[in-house]
Image: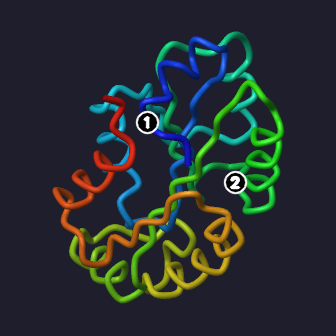
Amino acid sequence: MPHPAKAEGDAARGVQRLVLVTGPSGAGRSTAINVLEDLGYEAIDNLPLSLIPRLLDGPARPMPLALGLDVRNRDFSASNLIELIDRLTRAPEYAPEVLFLDCSADVLVRRYNETRRRHPLTPDQEPMAGVQAEADLLAPVRVRADVLIDTTELSPHDLKAELTRVFDLR
């Protein structure tokens, strides 16, 4: 994983630092995107994978990018995301990192029940069916993670502290 202090040097050399934030719904991706934005990243959530090449077209931006990617996007698939990761990793103008936020199935179901929200993969069923389907879908991406954070026992404040430790630009 690139050291955060390299961010300024990377931009000066024309290398775009890029954090791809993913993981199961309810594990803290939106919180992570907000934290990274507070740390100085340009943050974009729910960007379709097909739009990322257009976003990255052109010279490196002076600030690193954090992109939230999840199953709600119309063109999301593990194979599409892995293909994107591979393409970015091979390109010398990018310094990509995959941040995967994980959480136990029981806690994800509890979070869905507490918020009374429906799981995006199975809106008409119990949340556990969606949680399990999403875990299966994301398994190939999880093994590709550069940074894996299990949020099962973390409060939003704890997650912020961990992300600041890993991704702070100062």
5 and 25: which is toward the camera: 5
**Mark closer to the observer (1, 2):** 1
Position of residue 2 measured from the top left corner of the image (x, y, whole percent): 55, 41
Mark closer to the chain start, 1 or 2: 1
Pointers 1 and 2 in contact (C-beta within 8 Å): no
In screen coordinates, is 94 left or right of 121? Answer: right
Determine which quarter of the picture holds residue 56. Answer: top right
Residue at 57% in and 45% down: 20
Residue at the spot of label 1: 4
Quadrant the C terminus occupies:
top left
Say which element carries label 2: loop
> Image height check: is 108 above or below 43?
below
122 and 109: which is toward the camera: 109
Determine which quarter of the picture holds residue 84. Answer: top right
Q: Residues within 10 Å of mark 2 (few under 14, many from 20)?
A: some
Position of residue 151 measured from the top left corner of the image (x, y, whole percent): 33, 70
> Image height check: is 121 above or below 2?
below
Say which element carries label 1: loop
How far is disc 1 from disc 2 in space, using C-alphas? Answer: 28 Å
Position of residue 78 measured from the top left corner of the image (x, y, whole percent): 73, 62
What numbered label is drawn on residue 108? none
Residue at 76% in and 42% down: 89
Residue at the spot of label 2: 76
How many numbered marks does the figure carry? Answer: 2
Tag 2: residue type?
Phe
